[in-house]
Amino acid sequence: MCSLYFLSTSTNKYIEIHSILHKYKIDFKFLNMKLKEIQGESLSQIAVEKSKDAFKLISKPVIVEDDGLLIHGLNGFPGSYSSFVFKTIGSSGILKLLSHSKDRSASFVSVFVYNDGNNLRSFLGKTDGKISPKVAGPGWGYDPIFIPTGSELSFGQLKDNKIRLSHRTKAVTAFAKWYSRS
Ligand code: IMP
């Protein structure tokens, strides 16, 4: 029987998380549900609050994730506003904001939270990189404009190889190691 539930509206996140947790033989179920998202706080606080909301909804052990793209030349923007910014100005808007910027360095951060009502644990994953000069390749979200350090290709162009370098892999792997031990 499944004892772990991932609550999110993102099938893309589910597919990536599944490919990692599968290796650790950790079974979980995807519940396509929208959770309350507080605004203006840190990514960690947002993820923790989401996990509390998720646990309140189903009263079973939950995992949730919150991500942010932090562009260093823009003082960490969009950060915890990444989802709103993607929906409003999108990747092309980000490219416009950076059109005169020499510093295109950025980090993609994932906060992955486990909450079973008694234990609440957060796991952080960060991948450094830069924003590409133009939209590069397929992929979801900011994948076509984020080039991880050590690659010449964007997350989108890396396709399945994104998993080797992604912020999500780091956070989910840290969780998987802890969960397998406990
Ligand atoms: P969320 O608030 O955690 O859903 O993510 C913030 C924004 O970052 C959303 O617009 C997502 O589509 C985007 N995002 C999250 N993770 C990734 C990723 O791995 N690649 C590309 N975009 C992502």
Image (tube, rainbow, N blue to C red):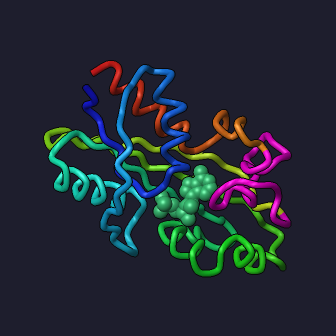
Q: Which corner quadrant of the figure contains ligand 1? A: bottom right
Q: Quadrant of residue 36?
A: bottom left
Q: 113 above or below 160? A: below
Q: 163 above or below 139? A: above
Drawn side of residue 91 relative to residue 65, left or right? right
**Magenta-colored segment: predominant secondary structure:** loop
Which x, y percent locates residue 132?
81, 61
Q: Residue at x 38, y 54 (%)?
A: 32
Q: Quadrant of residue 149?
A: top right
* Depth check, front residue: 142 or 131: 142
Which x, y percent locates residue 99?
82, 77
Q: Residue at x 59, y 81 (%)?
A: 88
- Give the extent of the magenta segment: 133-157
Query: How many callouts does the rendering have?
Result: 0
Q: Residue at x 48, y 44 (%)?
A: 14
Membership of 167 in magenta stretch: no
Q: 75 above or below 143? A: below
Which x, y percent locates residue 120?
24, 43
Membership of 141 in magenta stretch: yes
Quadrant including the N terminus: top left
Quadrant including the C terminus: top left
* Depth check, front residue: 147 or 21: 21
Q: Quadrant of residue 121?
A: top left
Q: Residue at x 78, y 66 (%)?
A: 103
